[in-house]
Image: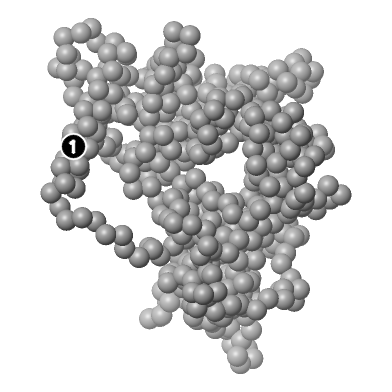
Amino acid sequence: MGGGVSLGDGGGVSGNIDTLGHAAGIGVFWNWIWELVFGKVKNGEFFRRMGIFGIVEDEGSIFGIFNSSTFRLCLGILDALAEIISVKEVHGVKCYYVHYVDFNKRLDEWVTEDCLDTRKVQYPRRDGTTPGTGAATPKKQVPSRPPSPSSLCNEPVNGSAVLQAALQKKMSRKRKATFIENDDSQDGPPQTPGPRPTGSLVAHHHDDIVTRMKNVELIELGRHRIRPWYFSPYPQEMVHLPCIYICEFCLKYRKSRKCLERHLAKCNLRHPPAKLFLDHKTLYYDTDPFLFYIMTNFDSRGYHIVGYFSKEKESSEDHNVACILTLPPYQRRGYGKLLIEFSYELSKFEGKTGSPEKPLSDLGLLSYRSYWAHTILDILLNVKPLVENEKPQITISEICELTSIKKEDVISTLQNLNLINYYKGQYIVTLNREIIEQHTAAMEKRQIRIDPKCLHWTPKDWSVRAKW
């Protein structure tokens, strides 16, 4: 559904936010900070104003999701183009579910009409798509000039009329595209199922409105309450609940805490199961062709899931990771890099190079680029010259062999760091002092590492299908 519109400031003001508007928004933000620091307002009120939904853990730390116009301003998406995915009416007020173009789906949200700048509507194309929109992080598109709203109908030109026209046009295109698709399928030869495509998961090929929208308000997993980022296929009667209660060991879900307590009294597991998948990829067939590695935190109550990654038993494209995830309460603690490091240690045991399955999310790409950069820099800084008083030399293939990072990832990392230079007819890698200092400081912070000496594992030959 829906065309693309620009977001206003969330407070009833449409249009572009000028310098004064930015200053005012930031001024309000810092005023709230001042009130919190000097005791003028309680913590709960501060977080309510900022749109932060807190998850209070035992240590009193807070894991928050920022979802207010002030933080949209700080993130640079206050005046971003947004695609309208769905519309609903709550107590007589129309709400629009929007996806911010060029931003990840986890930032999608419901907004009211006064947050939309309807003067910047981009109508759907003839193929039923909206320019520059996508489910995750699409490429930026140059917006085309929209047709004049007055030429569409004789009704008064206002925000509601423009939005309605855009939505109707999008639906009309979709119905036409569906009819043509069905007509072609009837005339063509019957489709026979082919072999399982390489990779466990592939990106969504069709614009599934249902799976593009967050449908779960809140979950309780162990000691944490988490506001989900993406769609999850829970039963319809569960998604309308204010909170879904999940057993952190067997991952069975219950509609209330009382029901969960009754389940926990009978559940014998004290560790999580081993079949998990991410939102932005679609599962083909079943989970049998995959291995799962789950990281847990152990205490007297059992093993609590921190994160996991899965990998194909056989990958024709040398993927050493299919899905990788760190749960929100444990993010920004180094666990993501630890999972990545472990996946490459397994590749070293297998004697091959590997790469994560694409597409990566924006956060996943940042984590991998950081790991690749520090791993490759560590090799470059410790390489020894073959002959005394000569400069050390190493090839791309040798870096791949030492790290098990695929050649394409090594080259792209060196290019992103601007380390490759052309000098006297050959390519050389140059490291400046700033890069070295940044790398040293980052490595000092990485206190949790994988010790390969403690890894006792023999790779299996999964080419024999009977072993599945």
**Image check: 212 left or right of 342?**
left
Q: Is residue 174 above or below residue 304?
A: above
Where is 95 relative to 368, above or below? above
- SS class, disc 1: helix
The residue that appears at 51% across and 65% down in the rendered structure is 289
Quarter of the image where the C terminus is located: bottom right
Label count reads 1
- Residue 165 appearing in the image: yes
Quadrant location of residue 171?
A: top left
Residue 152 at what x, y percent from top left? 17, 17
Residue type (three-letter) at the residue carrying disc 1: Phe
Q: Residues within 10 Å of mark 1 (few under 14, many from 20)?
A: few
For label 1, the residue is 179
In this rendering, the answer to whether 381 lies above or below 449 is below
127 to 118, vertically: above or below: below
Whether residue 411 is visible to the viewer of this picture, yes or no, is no
Q: Quadrant of the N terminus?
A: top left
Picture quadrant where residue 234 is located = top right
Q: Place residue 452 in its image quadrant.
A: bottom right
Question: Where is residue 353 drawn, in percent x and y?
Answer: 52, 74
Q: Residue at x 66, y 20 (%)?
A: 48
Residue 96 appears at what percent x and percent y? 41, 22
* Residue 456 position within the rendered picture, expressed as x and y whole percent measured from the top left: 72, 76
